[in-house]
Amino acid sequence: MQTLMLALLLAAVFGFFVPEVQKGLQRILHAHPALVWAVPFLLTLTFNMASALAGAFSFGLSLMVLAYTAAPVACAYLQGAGVIHRPSAGDFLTIGLLWLPIEFGAGQGLVPRAAQGFLHSVAYGIAILLGLTLFLGYRSFPGLKYSLPRRARDFRLPLAGFALVAPVLAVVGIAIGFIPWPHLPVKTAGQMAAAVGIIFAGTALPEEILFRSLIQNLIMLRLGASWRTLFLASVIFGCAHLDNGPQALPNWRYMIVATIAGWAYGQVYQRSESVMSSAGLHMLVDWTKHFFF
């Protein structure tokens, strides 16, 4: 049942790729902005079902999730619905309210250890759905590129980006002691093949939605498309990895490597027509690190 719950959340995330879904959501929320307040309750109900399934339900946890989902909605609601071309400080605050509680594991102490992995994935899915609802539907920003690949270029770019950035990441990562020298994979071909979809859906796409479709895109809309915007977005992406292992925290080695990778992901995002292109490059980098380093 837990696998089914995660599959349904993933299906909902991919459902937003359908143009008719995006247009329908925009039409409803722009005409009736107050309906956006139904979203926190629906997402909290979803989380409650998942926590009950994992034997981890509590009213304290439920109230915390409701507060988490309601805060970004309140921030967006105060600014109003519509097609927005210039983000405000409130829009960046909304992103922070979506991202930072997940980043720092808010509420983790209320969840039994055995259920933490599953409910973290559920919370991740809820955060993505809430972000898409607010930034695709309620406050509709151009340039999110939340669409399926449209041209052959969208498939070529991640491959070209990987060919260029992977050697750089390997050399820098080894030089600063972030990764060891490469080795032959020890997993089976089936495990390596299955990991492609898991890494793409569980890590690459969610992070690209946050760091490219939302953060990089909104910075660009605010400050303009320049190398400074790309650099700022890359540094933010790098800093997001300071609290990741396996080295001691703050992990400056991971930050350096992630900043370089973020620059490459950002370049692919800017040149493509779909966030799935940068997510594809992100997946290739993570997959290679996992199996060959």
Image (cartoon, rainbow, N blue to C red):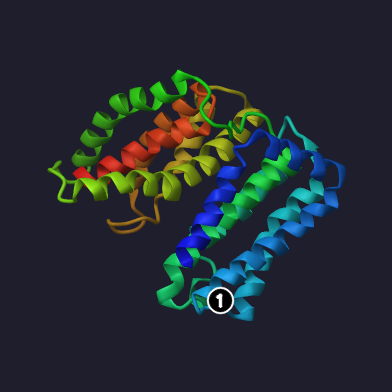
Residue 261 placement (x, y as % from top left)? 37, 35
Hey, which quadrant is residue 146 in on the image?
top right
Note whether residue 169 is visible: yes
Q: The residue tagged with tag 1: helix, strand or loop?
A: helix
Identify the residue at horizontal 60%, vertical 75% (top origin): 61
Q: Is residue 12 left or right of residue 252?
A: right
- In depth, the one of 189 and 122 nearer the eye is 189
Identify the residue at horizontal 57%, vertical 47% (top origin): 13
- In depth, the one of 7 and 98 nearer the eye is 7
Identify the residue at horizontal 40%, vertical 75% (top origin): 114
Residue beneath disc 1: 52
Identify the residue at horizontal 55%, vertical 69% (top origin): 50
Number of numbered callouts drawn: 1
The residue sitting at the right extreme is: 31
- The quarter in which the C terminus is drawn is top left
Residue 133 placement (x, y as % from top left)? 68, 47
Q: Is residue 269 left or right of residue 19?
A: left
**Taking 95 as reference, is 175 above or below it?**
above
Mark 1 surroundings within 10 Å by alpha-carbon count, few (fewer than 14), some (14 through 19), many (20 or more): few
Residue 269 placement (x, y as % from top left)? 49, 28
- In depth, the one of 108 and 49 nearer the eye is 49
**Taking 73 as reference, is 51 above or below it?**
below
